Image (cartoon, helix red, strand yellow):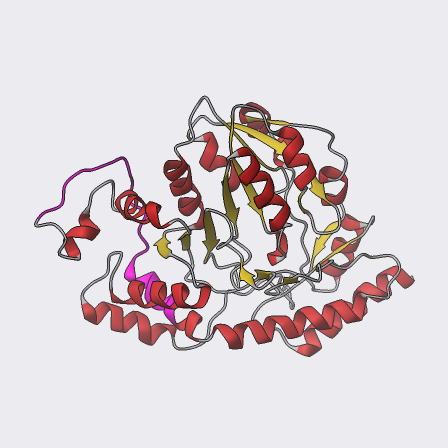
Amino acid sequence: MIVLIPFNKPCVIGEEATAVQEAIEHTKLSGNGPFGKKCTDWLEARLQCEKVILTPSCTAALEMTTLLTEVGEEDEVIMPSYTFVSTANAFALRGTAIRFVDIEPNTMNISPSEIEAAITDKTKAIVIVHYAGISCDMDAIMDIANRYGLWVIEDAAQALFSSYKGRPLGTIGHFGAISFHETKNFTCGEGGALIVNRPEAVERAEILQEKGTNREQFFKGMVDKYTWRDVGSSYLLSDLNAAYLSVQLQHADLINKSRLRAWNQYYYGLLDLPEVEVPHVPSDCHHNAHMFYIKTNQQQELIEYLKKHDIMAVTHYVPLHSSHAGMKFGKFIGEDQFTTTESEKIVRLPLYFGIGKEAVDDVVTHIQAFFNT
Protein backbone atom coordinates (compact mmCIF):
# COMPACT_ATOMS: atom_id res chain seq x y z
CA MET A 1 0.00 0.00 0.00
CA ILE A 2 1.26 3.49 -0.86
CA VAL A 3 1.07 5.77 2.17
CA LEU A 4 -0.11 9.11 0.83
CA ILE A 5 0.48 10.97 4.09
CA PRO A 6 3.67 9.64 5.72
CA PHE A 7 4.41 10.07 9.40
CA ASN A 8 7.67 11.88 8.68
CA LYS A 9 9.69 13.38 5.84
CA PRO A 10 13.27 14.45 6.55
CA CYS A 11 13.53 18.20 6.25
CA VAL A 12 15.05 19.42 2.97
CA ILE A 13 15.31 23.13 2.22
CA GLY A 14 16.82 22.73 -1.24
CA GLU A 15 20.23 24.33 -0.74
CA GLU A 16 21.89 21.44 1.08
CA ALA A 17 23.56 19.88 -1.97
CA THR A 18 25.31 23.17 -2.74
CA ALA A 19 26.65 23.38 0.81
CA VAL A 20 27.85 19.76 0.74
CA GLN A 21 29.61 20.38 -2.58
CA GLU A 22 31.29 23.43 -1.05
CA ALA A 23 32.50 21.28 1.84
CA ILE A 24 33.98 18.82 -0.64
CA GLU A 25 35.79 21.64 -2.42
CA HIS A 26 37.22 22.84 0.91
CA THR A 27 38.93 19.41 1.14
CA LYS A 28 38.19 19.37 4.86
CA LEU A 29 35.69 16.57 5.36
CA SER A 30 36.36 15.42 8.91
CA GLY A 31 35.03 17.00 12.10
CA ASN A 32 35.52 20.56 13.37
CA GLY A 33 35.87 21.97 9.88
CA PRO A 34 34.59 25.34 8.61
CA PHE A 35 30.97 24.23 8.38
CA GLY A 36 31.14 22.68 11.83
CA LYS A 37 32.37 26.01 13.20
CA LYS A 38 29.60 27.79 11.33
CA CYS A 39 27.00 25.57 13.02
CA THR A 40 28.49 25.80 16.50
CA ASP A 41 28.86 29.58 16.27
CA TRP A 42 25.23 29.86 15.18
CA LEU A 43 23.97 27.57 17.94
CA GLU A 44 26.02 29.25 20.66
CA ALA A 45 24.71 32.65 19.62
CA ARG A 46 21.11 31.47 19.36
CA LEU A 47 21.13 29.46 22.59
CA GLN A 48 23.38 31.89 24.50
CA CYS A 49 25.25 28.94 26.01
CA GLU A 50 28.85 28.39 27.06
CA LYS A 51 29.83 25.85 24.40
CA VAL A 52 28.30 23.64 21.72
CA ILE A 53 30.14 20.55 20.48
CA LEU A 54 28.81 18.80 17.37
CA THR A 55 28.63 15.02 17.70
CA PRO A 56 27.71 12.10 15.42
CA SER A 57 24.41 11.70 17.30
CA CYS A 58 22.50 12.73 20.39
CA THR A 59 23.46 9.28 21.73
CA ALA A 60 27.13 10.27 21.47
CA ALA A 61 26.44 13.54 23.26
CA LEU A 62 24.77 11.62 26.11
CA GLU A 63 27.76 9.28 26.29
CA MET A 64 30.02 12.32 26.65
CA THR A 65 27.98 13.52 29.63
CA THR A 66 28.64 10.23 31.42
CA LEU A 67 32.38 10.82 31.05
CA LEU A 68 32.13 14.46 32.09
CA THR A 69 30.13 13.61 35.22
CA GLU A 70 32.32 10.56 35.90
CA VAL A 71 29.43 8.30 36.80
CA GLY A 72 30.48 4.72 37.42
CA GLU A 73 29.54 1.33 38.76
CA GLU A 74 29.05 2.57 42.32
CA ASP A 75 26.59 5.28 41.25
CA GLU A 76 22.89 5.61 40.47
CA VAL A 77 21.19 7.85 37.95
CA ILE A 78 17.50 8.80 37.91
CA MET A 79 15.55 9.14 34.67
CA PRO A 80 12.08 8.54 33.22
CA SER A 81 11.23 5.09 31.90
CA TYR A 82 9.26 6.75 29.11
CA THR A 83 12.14 7.66 26.81
CA PHE A 84 14.30 6.36 23.98
CA VAL A 85 16.87 3.68 24.76
CA SER A 86 19.84 6.05 24.24
CA THR A 87 18.95 7.94 27.42
CA ALA A 88 19.57 4.79 29.45
CA ASN A 89 22.18 3.11 27.23
CA ALA A 90 24.74 5.84 27.80
CA PHE A 91 24.72 5.08 31.52
CA ALA A 92 24.39 1.31 31.20
CA LEU A 93 27.66 1.38 29.26
CA ARG A 94 29.32 2.86 32.35
CA GLY A 95 27.84 0.23 34.65
CA THR A 96 25.75 2.85 36.43
CA ALA A 97 22.56 1.64 38.11
CA ILE A 98 19.53 3.19 36.38
CA ARG A 99 16.58 4.21 38.52
CA PHE A 100 13.44 4.76 36.49
CA VAL A 101 10.66 6.93 37.92
CA ASP A 102 7.15 7.86 36.90
CA ILE A 103 5.99 10.71 34.67
CA GLU A 104 3.40 13.44 34.93
CA PRO A 105 0.47 12.41 32.72
CA ASN A 106 -0.32 15.87 31.36
CA THR A 107 3.10 16.35 29.71
CA MET A 108 4.60 12.81 29.73
CA ASN A 109 7.65 14.39 31.42
CA ILE A 110 9.45 13.13 34.51
CA SER A 111 7.77 13.87 37.85
CA PRO A 112 9.93 16.03 40.17
CA SER A 113 8.31 14.54 43.27
CA GLU A 114 9.18 11.03 42.07
CA ILE A 115 12.76 12.14 41.43
CA GLU A 116 13.20 13.30 45.00
CA ALA A 117 11.64 10.14 46.41
CA ALA A 118 14.14 8.00 44.45
CA ILE A 119 17.31 9.77 45.64
CA THR A 120 19.76 7.73 47.71
CA ASP A 121 23.32 8.34 48.87
CA LYS A 122 24.44 6.67 45.62
CA THR A 123 22.54 9.03 43.32
CA LYS A 124 24.87 11.12 41.18
CA ALA A 125 22.77 12.53 38.36
CA ILE A 126 19.27 13.27 37.15
CA VAL A 127 18.59 12.82 33.44
CA ILE A 128 15.42 14.53 32.25
CA VAL A 129 13.72 14.26 28.87
CA HIS A 130 11.74 17.13 27.35
CA TYR A 131 9.08 15.02 25.66
CA ALA A 132 7.68 16.36 22.37
CA GLY A 133 9.77 19.50 22.84
CA ILE A 134 7.73 20.58 25.89
CA SER A 135 9.80 21.43 28.93
CA CYS A 136 9.98 19.54 32.19
CA ASP A 137 9.42 21.54 35.40
CA MET A 138 12.99 22.81 35.44
CA ASP A 139 12.66 25.05 38.50
CA ALA A 140 11.60 22.10 40.63
CA ILE A 141 14.25 19.80 39.14
CA MET A 142 17.12 22.26 39.55
CA ASP A 143 16.03 22.96 43.12
CA ILE A 144 16.21 19.24 43.91
CA ALA A 145 19.59 18.92 42.18
CA ASN A 146 21.03 21.89 44.05
CA ARG A 147 19.80 20.65 47.42
CA TYR A 148 21.26 17.17 46.91
CA GLY A 149 24.36 18.15 44.94
CA LEU A 150 23.40 16.25 41.77
CA TRP A 151 24.26 16.70 38.11
CA VAL A 152 21.38 17.55 35.75
CA ILE A 153 21.57 16.33 32.16
CA GLU A 154 18.90 17.49 29.76
CA ASP A 155 18.02 15.00 27.05
CA ALA A 156 16.74 17.71 24.73
CA ALA A 157 16.84 15.52 21.62
CA GLN A 158 13.38 16.73 20.61
CA ALA A 159 13.60 20.22 22.05
CA LEU A 160 15.93 22.46 20.06
CA PHE A 161 14.48 26.02 20.19
CA SER A 162 11.92 25.14 22.84
CA SER A 163 12.19 27.12 26.08
CA TYR A 164 11.24 27.25 29.75
CA LYS A 165 10.53 30.70 31.20
CA GLY A 166 12.45 32.17 28.27
CA ARG A 167 15.52 29.95 28.66
CA PRO A 168 16.37 27.57 25.80
CA LEU A 169 16.05 23.91 26.69
CA GLY A 170 19.40 22.19 26.96
CA THR A 171 20.95 25.28 28.58
CA ILE A 172 19.37 25.05 32.05
CA GLY A 173 21.00 21.90 33.43
CA HIS A 174 24.73 21.28 33.60
CA PHE A 175 24.75 19.61 30.17
CA GLY A 176 22.28 19.24 27.32
CA ALA A 177 22.09 16.81 24.41
CA ILE A 178 20.24 17.54 21.17
CA SER A 179 19.58 15.52 18.04
CA PHE A 180 19.82 16.20 14.31
CA HIS A 181 18.47 12.79 13.31
CA GLU A 182 16.26 12.72 10.22
CA THR A 183 13.15 12.59 12.43
CA LYS A 184 14.00 15.90 14.14
CA ASN A 185 13.02 19.44 13.20
CA PHE A 186 16.53 20.22 11.92
CA THR A 187 18.58 17.41 10.48
CA CYS A 188 21.76 16.29 8.79
CA GLY A 189 20.67 12.65 8.53
CA GLU A 190 22.52 11.54 11.66
CA GLY A 191 23.97 14.05 14.07
CA GLY A 192 23.73 15.68 17.46
CA ALA A 193 25.31 18.19 19.80
CA LEU A 194 26.49 18.47 23.37
CA ILE A 195 25.63 21.72 25.13
CA VAL A 196 28.15 22.50 27.86
CA ASN A 197 26.84 24.95 30.46
CA ARG A 198 29.79 24.84 32.88
CA PRO A 199 32.86 26.84 31.75
CA GLU A 200 35.23 24.58 33.65
CA ALA A 201 33.99 21.55 31.65
CA VAL A 202 34.65 22.98 28.18
CA GLU A 203 38.31 22.02 27.87
CA ARG A 204 37.72 18.44 28.98
CA ALA A 205 34.72 18.12 26.65
CA GLU A 206 36.93 19.13 23.72
CA ILE A 207 39.52 16.53 24.74
CA LEU A 208 36.89 13.78 25.07
CA GLN A 209 35.55 14.65 21.61
CA GLU A 210 39.01 14.29 20.06
CA LYS A 211 39.65 10.73 21.25
CA GLY A 212 41.13 11.91 24.53
CA THR A 213 43.76 14.16 22.94
CA ASN A 214 44.30 17.92 23.16
CA ARG A 215 44.12 18.16 19.39
CA GLU A 216 41.74 21.14 19.56
CA GLN A 217 44.27 23.07 21.63
CA PHE A 218 46.90 22.24 18.99
CA PHE A 219 44.73 23.72 16.22
CA LYS A 220 44.15 26.82 18.35
CA GLY A 221 47.94 27.24 18.68
CA MET A 222 47.87 26.66 22.43
CA VAL A 223 50.34 23.72 22.27
CA ASP A 224 53.02 22.79 19.73
CA LYS A 225 51.86 19.15 19.50
CA TYR A 226 48.94 17.18 20.77
CA THR A 227 49.09 14.07 22.93
CA TRP A 228 46.85 11.59 24.68
CA ARG A 229 45.45 13.36 27.75
CA ASP A 230 42.32 11.50 28.86
CA VAL A 231 39.82 8.84 27.94
CA GLY A 232 37.67 9.74 24.96
CA SER A 233 36.35 8.62 21.63
CA SER A 234 35.67 9.94 18.14
CA TYR A 235 32.73 12.16 19.05
CA LEU A 236 32.99 14.30 15.92
CA LEU A 237 30.41 15.21 13.29
CA SER A 238 31.91 15.24 9.80
CA ASP A 239 31.99 18.54 7.95
CA LEU A 240 29.85 17.00 5.20
CA ASN A 241 27.05 16.52 7.72
CA ALA A 242 27.71 19.94 9.20
CA ALA A 243 27.39 21.50 5.73
CA TYR A 244 23.93 20.01 5.36
CA LEU A 245 23.00 21.11 8.87
CA SER A 246 24.21 24.66 8.33
CA VAL A 247 21.54 25.20 5.69
CA GLN A 248 18.83 23.96 8.03
CA LEU A 249 19.96 26.28 10.81
CA GLN A 250 20.03 29.25 8.43
CA HIS A 251 16.36 28.53 7.73
CA ALA A 252 15.41 27.60 11.30
CA ASP A 253 12.69 30.22 11.62
CA LEU A 254 11.09 29.16 8.35
CA ILE A 255 11.11 25.52 9.47
CA ASN A 256 9.66 26.40 12.87
CA LYS A 257 6.90 28.47 11.29
CA SER A 258 5.86 25.59 9.02
CA ARG A 259 5.76 23.08 11.86
CA LEU A 260 3.92 25.38 14.26
CA ARG A 261 1.26 26.06 11.64
CA ALA A 262 0.58 22.34 11.28
CA TRP A 263 0.75 21.77 15.06
CA ASN A 264 -1.81 24.50 15.72
CA GLN A 265 -4.03 23.20 12.94
CA TYR A 266 -4.10 19.78 14.61
CA TYR A 267 -4.59 21.28 18.06
CA TYR A 268 -7.61 23.42 17.24
CA GLY A 269 -9.06 20.81 14.90
CA LEU A 270 -9.05 18.11 17.60
CA LEU A 271 -9.36 20.17 20.79
CA ASP A 272 -13.11 19.74 21.16
CA LEU A 273 -13.23 16.05 20.30
CA PRO A 274 -14.29 14.47 23.62
CA GLU A 275 -12.74 11.07 22.89
CA VAL A 276 -9.18 12.35 22.60
CA GLU A 277 -6.73 14.33 24.72
CA VAL A 278 -4.50 16.86 22.97
CA PRO A 279 -1.02 17.89 24.23
CA HIS A 280 -0.78 20.13 27.28
CA VAL A 281 1.68 23.02 27.07
CA PRO A 282 2.30 24.70 30.44
CA SER A 283 1.99 28.48 30.38
CA ASP A 284 5.68 29.01 31.13
CA CYS A 285 6.81 26.82 28.22
CA HIS A 286 7.31 27.58 24.55
CA HIS A 287 7.53 24.51 22.32
CA ASN A 288 9.05 23.86 18.89
CA ALA A 289 6.23 21.80 17.34
CA HIS A 290 8.43 18.75 17.25
CA MET A 291 5.54 16.34 17.59
CA PHE A 292 1.77 16.32 17.66
CA TYR A 293 0.18 13.43 19.49
CA ILE A 294 -3.20 12.61 20.88
CA LYS A 295 -4.18 10.19 23.61
CA THR A 296 -7.02 7.74 23.14
CA ASN A 297 -8.15 4.48 24.68
CA GLN A 298 -8.50 3.16 21.12
CA GLN A 299 -4.87 3.55 20.14
CA GLN A 300 -4.42 0.51 17.89
CA GLU A 301 -7.89 0.73 16.37
CA LEU A 302 -7.32 4.37 15.36
CA ILE A 303 -3.88 3.64 13.90
CA GLU A 304 -5.31 0.81 11.80
CA TYR A 305 -8.21 2.98 10.66
CA LEU A 306 -5.89 5.77 9.55
CA LYS A 307 -3.62 3.28 7.80
CA LYS A 308 -6.58 2.04 5.75
CA HIS A 309 -7.07 5.63 4.65
CA ASP A 310 -3.42 6.06 3.63
CA ILE A 311 -2.39 8.00 6.73
CA MET A 312 0.60 6.80 8.72
CA ALA A 313 0.21 7.39 12.45
CA VAL A 314 2.39 5.62 15.02
CA THR A 315 2.75 4.87 18.72
CA HIS A 316 5.88 5.80 20.67
CA TYR A 317 8.16 4.40 23.38
CA VAL A 318 7.61 1.11 25.13
CA PRO A 319 8.55 1.98 28.74
CA LEU A 320 12.17 0.96 29.27
CA HIS A 321 11.61 -0.67 32.65
CA SER A 322 9.40 -3.31 31.00
CA SER A 323 12.10 -4.29 28.48
CA HIS A 324 14.65 -7.07 28.84
CA ALA A 325 17.58 -4.64 29.06
CA GLY A 326 15.63 -2.27 31.28
CA MET A 327 15.11 -5.00 33.84
CA LYS A 328 18.77 -6.00 33.59
CA PHE A 329 20.32 -2.56 33.95
CA GLY A 330 17.68 -0.68 35.89
CA LYS A 331 14.83 -0.72 38.34
CA PHE A 332 11.57 1.20 38.57
CA ILE A 333 11.38 3.13 41.83
CA GLY A 334 7.95 3.89 43.27
CA GLU A 335 4.64 3.16 41.60
CA ASP A 336 4.17 2.97 37.83
CA GLN A 337 0.98 4.97 38.03
CA PHE A 338 1.14 6.72 34.66
CA THR A 339 4.13 5.59 32.57
CA THR A 340 2.64 2.41 31.15
CA THR A 341 -1.05 3.35 31.02
CA GLU A 342 -0.44 6.74 29.39
CA SER A 343 2.08 5.37 26.88
CA GLU A 344 -0.56 2.93 25.68
CA LYS A 345 -2.79 5.85 24.66
CA ILE A 346 -0.29 7.78 22.52
CA VAL A 347 -0.94 8.18 18.78
CA ARG A 348 1.55 10.41 16.94
CA LEU A 349 0.23 12.14 13.83
CA PRO A 350 2.06 13.12 10.62
CA LEU A 351 4.10 16.28 11.14
CA TYR A 352 7.05 17.50 9.06
CA PHE A 353 8.37 20.58 7.32
CA GLY A 354 6.13 21.45 4.39
CA ILE A 355 3.15 19.29 5.29
CA GLY A 356 0.21 20.96 3.58
CA LYS A 357 -2.90 22.38 5.18
CA GLU A 358 -4.99 19.97 3.12
CA ALA A 359 -3.04 16.97 4.43
CA VAL A 360 -3.55 18.03 8.05
CA ASP A 361 -7.25 18.67 7.35
CA ASP A 362 -7.49 15.16 5.92
CA VAL A 363 -5.97 13.62 9.05
CA VAL A 364 -8.26 15.65 11.34
CA THR A 365 -11.32 14.76 9.29
CA HIS A 366 -10.55 11.04 9.41
CA ILE A 367 -9.96 11.12 13.17
CA GLN A 368 -13.28 12.89 13.65
CA ALA A 369 -14.97 10.32 11.40
CA PHE A 370 -13.44 7.43 13.37
CA PHE A 371 -14.89 8.62 16.65
CA ASN A 372 -18.25 9.57 15.16
CA THR A 373 -18.98 6.19 13.58
Tell which of 266 and 350 is nearer to you. Answer: 266
Query: Is residue 253 found left or right of 70 in the rendered image?
Result: right
Instruction: Report the predominant secondary structure element of the magenta stretch.
Output: loop
Q: Give the residues in magenta.
A: 225-246
How many numbered marks appear?
Answer: 0
Snapshot quadrant of residue 330 = top right
Q: Is residue 150 visible?
A: yes
Snapshot quadrant of residue 221 = bottom left
Q: In the orientation shown, which residue stands out farthest toward the left? A: 224
Q: Residue at x 20, y 71 (%)?
A: 25
Q: Position of residue 62 (x, y in %)?
A: 44, 43
Query: Is residue 134 found left or right of 337 in the rendered image?
Result: left
Q: Is residue 5 magenta?
A: no
Q: Is residue 84 visible?
A: no
Relative to 104, is 294 above or below?
A: below
Q: Residue at x 23, y 68 (%)?
A: 24
Which quadrant holds the C terminus? bottom right
Tell which of 286 and 147 is nearer to you. Answer: 147
Q: Position of residue 129 (x, y in %)?
A: 58, 47
Q: Position of residue 296 (x, y in %)?
A: 81, 52
Q: Is residue 239 magenta?
A: yes
Which quadrant holds the N terminus? bottom right
Relative to 305, is 229 above or below?
A: above
Q: In the orientation shown, which residue stands out farthest toward the right? A: 373
Q: Position of residue 313 (x, y in %)?
A: 68, 58
